[in-house]
Amino acid sequence: MTKLALGTHPFLLGFEQLEQLVERTAKSGNDGYPPYNIEQTSEWSYRITLAVAGFAERDLSITVEDNALVIRGRQSEDADGRVFLHRGIAARQFQRNFVLADGVDVGEAVMENGLLHVDLTRSEPDRVIQTIKIRKG
């Protein structure tokens, strides 16, 4: 018995990139930092919330690159000469990627109490029925 790859199944025409997308998503950072939530706020909207304690707005960047929401954080170095006896609050840089489906748009981003909220909206799919005429050959 031959095993078919997801992108090569005969009923999935035009989905060749789907397998690459699944592999890319599986390889994205699974280190758990920073922790995040994804919630559905309505039938057509979502909110991603990242716990970014210690980061200021200037330390964060949010971009959309190749249908992926990319959130990066990099804290500036402490220039005031502080000496930590214990440093339990993470201060490392991070990058979180979220693959966006077609029709999902990134709305506003809000920083509140050490949480970064990014709102997403999904457009309602167009329901199109197309009739194809058969011509004689």
Image: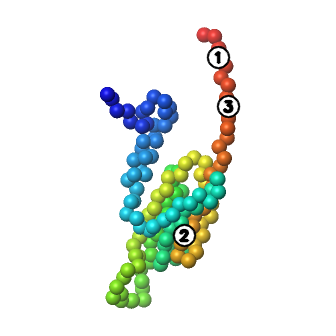
Whether residue 126 is situated above or below residue 98 in the rendered picture: above
Q: Point out residue 87 in the picture as x, y percentages from the top left corner.
A: 36, 82
Q: Residue placed at 53% from the left, 66% from the top?
A: 49
Q: Residue placed at 43% from the left, 32% from the top?
A: 9
Q: Point out residue 105 in the picture as x, y percentages from the top left corner.
A: 61, 54
For mark 3, what is the residue? Answer: 129
Q: Is residue 2 visible?
A: yes
Q: Is residue 63 visible?
A: no
Element assignment for label 1:
loop
Alpha carbon distance from label 1 to label 3: 16 Å
Q: Give the mark nearer the N terminus: 1 vs 2.
A: 2
Which residue is the extreme one toward the top? Answer: 137
Alpha carbon distance from label 3 to label 2: 41 Å
Q: Nearer the viewer, residue 8 or 73?
A: 8
Q: Residues within 10 Å of mark 1 (few under 14, many from 20)?
A: few
Amino acid at dot 1: Ile
Whether residue 6 is situated above or below residue 34 in the rendered picture: above
For mark 1, what is the residue? Answer: 134
Amino acid at dot 3: Ile
Whether residue 95 is situated above or below residue 52 in the rendered picture: above
Whether residue 70 is situated above or below residue 130 in the rendered picture: below
Q: Give the mark nearer the N terminus: 1 vs 3.
A: 3
